[in-house]
Image: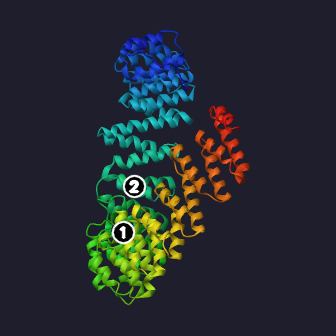
Amino acid sequence: MTLPPVRSVAAESESDLIAVLRSDAPEAEKAVVCKKLAIEGSPAAVGELAKLLSNPRLSSWARIALEVIPGQEADEALRQATQSLDGRLLVGVINSIGVRRDAAAVGALAARLQDSDSEVASAAAVALGRIGNDAATKSLQQSLVSTSGTTRNAVAEGYLLCAERLQAEDKSGAATEIFDEIRSADLPLQRIVEATRGAILSRDQDGIPLLLETFRSNDKKLFQLALSTAREFPGGEVDLALADELTRAAPSRAALIVQAMADRPQTVVLEAVVQAARSGDKHIRLSAIDALKRVGDVSSLPVLLDIASGQDAELSQTAKDTLAEIPSDGVNARLVALLPEAEGNRYPLLIELVGRRRIDAVPDLVNALQHSDPAVRSAALIALGETVSLEKLDLLITQVLAPSRPEDVATAQQALKSASVRMPDRDACAAKLAVAMQQAPATTKTWLLETLSEVGGTTALQTLAMSAKSDDAELQDAGSRLLGKWNNLDAAPVLIDLAKTAPEEKYQVRALRGYIGLARKFNMPERDRVEMCQRALDQASRIDEQKLVLDVLKLHPSVAALKLAIQAKRIPALKEEATDATAEIAQTLRKKGVDISRILSGEGA
């Protein structure tokens, strides 16, 4: 039942709430009262709530309260209702009895297991399972033999609940008997799967053979059950069994088993995972290499480094990814310690890992910049881009401005940009780049401006503005272009100023378009937006930009926008477009219920 909006129930005391149930108040209001009684109700409310159990629209709301009100009164009311209800209403009451685990209802529920209504019989079976005492368990055991179809499936579900309760009460032997009984019965696979899980776990360490048997089942659902059960199995003996099973299973299954092993990091047989990564079926190797992200340690490094240095691209990349994420206890120090003696492709690999793991090893990376192998130098530059601090950013700036090898400039620029955009102090970083611009060759200055635009912040904005007004044509072009793409309102004053003072008209137009773009796409008070549009109209000398202003007014209609559109009709070349914009804005405002008649009549529109 979906509750419609109703007036607030002002009653605060339980007696007032009960009075509402006794009254002729609307059913929706009574439903709200039932919800309140689930919080505030006592046995005193049971009588009135019980009267609602036969009401198809209020029964479920009454049961919400009856399920939680303490005391025997609620139990007795629900039991009494089972004698007079049928169909869905009876099913609901039986469910509530199960929620309350009313042991006194076992006899009545057991009788319902033979009910001609399969929904009623099924509800009774599950409710008996939730009660789970000896009498309930016995009745379900007997019914498992005598029932069939849907009801039998529900009986098995209830019987499983009894077994789980026994196991929780440290009665594993009795629980195991039930699990085994269900496993051997003719039941839907889902019940078999649930019973098999219980049978394995209830046996504790003696369940390992059954777990392995389940791993070897031809049924995919049982194999998936084995994977999930292995993850929750107690103790370390099962890890040895999993390591052995890993060597026996088909590759597609072994690849999944190794993942289950890695999900037991406290007891995993690490050497088995490492061995699976070292050689054998590629599918298993890839899974094992990935698993080492979670369970690998320093001892795993030799194998992973060998694989990462190998010729198979897929294995190599997977190993690199694992080396970048493997738990860091001792790993970082070991990787740095290997750097001085590294040779061949192992050297750039180690440097790459230093960068990906963000290890502070700047001196080693600076040394690598002098290496004759361009792959080493490239890896060192990229790693510096990932690790260098603001204080040492000049190392990369120098590599860009005065490279010892011209062929490294592009990589140095990439590294400097990576380092710059991750600096937490944007203005301090931008200040360093601005100083670098003064020393940079002409071909590098534009690139530095682009980097500054990605760094952002006040200093970067000011540097772009100065460049756009400089005597250098290339800087004018780059500065105005980048300012036009600036992605926050801080650029608005700079752009409108540039629209007036830029050295060339084309840059003035570019700046004005950037300014109008800011007014279009950012949230701001409508008064501020219209003020920006007014400034843009005042500055615009071409109809193209004037039309763009009208587009902003139409996209963000307001009374102030309407007034400005009316004013724009005074511009001869814009009159037709402004008239259309006025009509469109006026129509939108009318739909919102805004009275604009005085504005339109006052302006003669």
Residue occupying the point 49% across, 65% down: 252
- Tell which of 169 and 487 is nearer to you: 487
Q: Residue at x 26, y 73 (%)?
A: 333
Question: Which image quadrant for residue 26?
Answer: top right
The answer to which of marks 2 and 1 sits earlier in the sequence is: 2
Amino acid under disc 1:
Ala
Do we see residue 306 in this rendering? no
- What is the tally of numbered marks visible in this picture? 2
Name the residue beneath numbered marker 1. 431
Q: At which x and y percent is residue 296?
A: 33, 67
Q: Residues within 10 Å of mark 1 (few under 14, many from 20)?
A: some
Residue 278 appears in which quarter of the rendering?
bottom left
Most extreme residue toward the right is 576
The answer to whether mark 2 and mark 1 are in CB contact below 8 A is: no
Location of residue 121 with respect to 228 vertically, above or below: above
Quadrant for the C terminus in the image: top right
Residue 478 is situated, as x and y percent measured from the top left of the image, at 52, 71
Task: Look at label 2 and name its amino acid.
Answer: Leu
Q: Which residue is mark 2?
A: 211
Relative to the observer, which residue lies in front, 478 or 187?
Answer: 478
As measured in the structure, the alpha-carbon distance from the residue carrying label 2 to the one carrying label 1 is 64 Å
Residue 466 at what x, y percent from top left?
A: 45, 68
Q: Is residue 397 above or below residue 404?
A: above
Q: Position of residue 428 (x, y in %)?
A: 34, 66
Tag shown at residue 129:
none
| Element under disc 2 | helix
